[in-house]
Amino acid sequence: MRGLQLPLTQTQKVRLQRALEKLEALSTKANSNASVTVADTIPVNYEDGFLKGHGTTELNGEVVATVCGVVERVNKLVYVRTLRARYKPEVGDIIVGRVIEVAPKRWRLDINYSQDAVLMLSSINLPDGIQRRRTAEDELNMRAIFEENDVICAEVRGFQHDGLHLQARSQKYGKLQRGQLLSIPSYLVKRRKQHWHYLDEYGIDLILGCNGFVWVGEHVETKDEMLVDQADKPDSQTSKTNDHSTSLEGQEQTYTPLETRQNICRIANAIRVLSMLGFVVTIEVVMEVVNLGVSQNMDTHEMLGSEFCVLVAEREAERRSQKKNRG
Amino acid sequence: MEYVSPEGLRIDGRRPMEMRKLQAEIGVVAKADGSAVFEMGNTKVIAAVYGPREVQNRSQQLNDQALVRCEYSMANFSTGDRMRKPKGDRRSTEISLVIRQTMEACILTQLMPRSQIDIYVQVLQADGGTRSACINAATLALADAGIPMRDFVTSCSAGYLNSTPLLDLNYVEDSAGGPDVTIGILPKLDKVTLLQVPSDRIICQAFFMS
């Protein structure tokens, strides 16, 4: 938690302090003596041999940290996990990004990394869903797919010679509309099996991008590609007319009901509170915070107030202590 | 004017080899990747680091290392009489350059090729030694941003007045006209990365003798 700027009353201060102390007592002490700052010597066993990982360098035969963080050891590898740094992509990460430039055959995306990511025209699914070579015409129509400032969900494909490449080869990837983009520190989002979440009771999609960009938006039905293909094949003409009608419907459907909008704000505020307190954002914790807000009859805007913040901290301390007792 | 009293005390009551009170805080700018406020007595400096991020000007992009940029400015209210033009004059351009070179020497720039690191430093209160306070603040902000560095840079100024070497000059002592020097060292590597002596001030040989 960094520089919490909230007007707290005396009792709230005491309660927050107590909750934070409780959290600290619960945290594992295994790594507590392994924190280093820049230029600290890391003790290693020289006889066994070791591998220097990220955040370390060699100086006069000693292993020295180059960043502030926690020393991690995996077999012979010694590296320093930074406390705070920009997002570092790994192949297969689900990320949310914003288009900043439409370039020849590619889009450039801001993904909170030290370079812009590249999404090639050839590594996305075309809107018509047909697998084919990208023509010059496709290239001219790129703005019809993604424009500048569009928010996009994609997957990290890997590093190529000209930078970080992304891909979006599925129905679930692509443009995100009708929702909020939140930017939280990337270390608060842990890599998990599932980053898409459909909260059916609220009718909302939640995407926790590994790069710290979180999308909260209205739920969109993703068509199963296989089913669509099969349905289309028997009669291509009807499917064409269908396409037309869906686009018209699409224009009408841009209206999002008030309730859904309120739910979006509610969930977004829950994530804001969690990131303000520096708690890891997972779907379970987010839902717990949302439910806490509902059960306390908190208005959406009150969720960012100091009272709710203290409540969340207390609840989190309780949750972790229960988890520890069980485990 | 007497800068050191016969009892060996300076104007603000310090001993000649005594520093002013240091105070630092990190994480003061919410939107920045790293930030710090550094105080040396009444000198107060804020630093913010953005990056490593995409290079804004493509022609400046370096394929083997990161581009480090620095901007130094003084707030209008930082000095006794209000400043008209807080940045862009010769003095601040020079200090920007000094900070940039000092920080570039300790950042492991080769680890972040094709990216750019921006350091913004602003003096909030000026009371002598702004140069060294800025370097200290920039170091803290870089460490906060998680940017790999060889070592912390620590900096301080020193001067020579009334036949006494003085550490960490304040504004009155700095403007007294004696020789002064700003140094920056890498404590772990035991190396000097910055050594500045204003050429018009080298008037006293005894300074280097003592």
Image (cartoon, coloured by chain):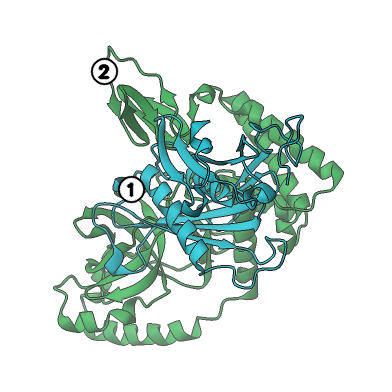
Foreground disc of the pair 2, 1? 1
Number of numbered discs visible in the structure rendering: 2
Left or right: residue A271 compared with residue A78? right
Q: Which chain is cyan?
A: B
- Label 2 SS: loop
Q: Nearer the viewer, residue B171 or A311?
A: B171
Report in which chain the residue with disc 1 lies: B
Asked if residue B116 can be seen in this view, the reply is yes
Amino acid tagged 1? Thr
Callout 2 and callout 1 share a chain:
no
Q: Nearer the viewer, residue A219 or A38?
A: A38
Image position of A250 with respect to A50: above or below: below
Q: Residue at x 43, y 31 (%)?
A: A39
The disc at residue A109 is none
Q: Position of residue B15 (x, y in %)?
A: 70, 31
Amino acid tagged 2? Gly
Residue on which disc 2 sits: A49
Residue on which disc 1 sits: B109
Image position of A327 with respect to A164: above or below: above
Q: Which chain is green?
A: A
Asked if residue A208 can be seen in this view, the reply is no
Q: Position of residue B9 (x, y in %)?
A: 74, 33
